[in-house]
Image: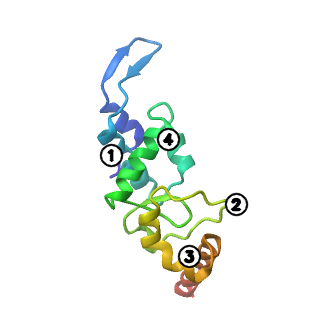
Amino acid sequence: MARSVKESEKDLKVVYEDEDLVVIRAPDDMELEKIVISIIRSKGRPVTWHELRKELSGIAGEDRLRKVLVKLIERDEIVEMIDGSFGLKGMEVTYVPRRLKKRVRPLVPKKFRIRWGHLVETAGSISAAIQYLREAKLKGRRGRIN
């Protein structure tokens, strides 16, 4: 069973506690990596930057979160999906990309090009590639239902 962020927070050292306030030590990068993986695993699907940032507010800032995501992507522990969300390795096979108004640049462009470059080149743009994947995966799901 995947651990929630609250369960992961329990592992962090309490610095001060009284009846109104609890102060915990911020996680180091290794602990933050485990928490990020735990969040994705507990959701059971790729999560967006905004979801991660919301879950980790008060625990880690945006720069630290970005740094940890880059490390995890470079080590192939998580995958940056074509729509910019982040999932565990293997989730890209069944994931239906979300439609986004604007796709920000990839965190690790080299890994992104290796994984998605051929599709983006064939489709002509990231937006067109997202639309193609959405349609193909949704059509595949309908075909299995019938």
The disc at residue 91 is: none
User: Residue 97, relative to residue 58: is it above or below?
Assistant: below
Q: Earlier in the sequence, mark 1 or mark 4?
A: 1
Identify the element where label 4 is drawn.
Answer: helix
Say few, some or many: other residues with alpha carbon within 10 Å of mark 3 (under 14 / 14 to 19 / 20 or more). Answer: some
Task: Report the Cα–Cα distance between label 3 and label 4.
Answer: 31 Å
Q: Are marks 1 and 4 in contact (CB under 8 Å)?
A: no
Residue type indicated by callout 2: Lys
- Residue hosting label 3: 120
Q: Earlier in the sequence, mark 2 or mark 3?
A: 2
Identify the element where label 3 is drawn.
Answer: helix
Task: Report the Cα–Cα distance between label 1 and label 4.
Answer: 14 Å
Q: Are marks 1 and 3 in contact (CB under 8 Å)?
A: no
> What is the x, y in percent for residue 2?
35, 51
Task: Report the Cα–Cα distance between label 2 and label 1.
Answer: 30 Å
Q: Decide if residue 136 is in sight here.
A: no
Q: Residue furthest front?
A: 110
Left or right, 71 with respect to 21, comes to left
Q: Image quadrant of residue 124? A: bottom right
Task: Report the Cα–Cα distance between label 1 and label 3.
Answer: 31 Å
Say few, some or many: other residues with alpha carbon within 10 Å of mark 4 (under 14 / 14 to 19 / 20 or more). Answer: some
Task: Report the Cα–Cα distance between label 2 and label 3.
Answer: 17 Å
Q: Decide if residue 62 is in sight here.
A: yes
- Residue hosting label 4: 55
Q: Closest to the observer: 106 or 141?
A: 106
Residue type indicated by callout 1: Lys
Q: Earlier in the sequence, mark 3 or mark 4?
A: 4
The disc at residue 34 is: 1
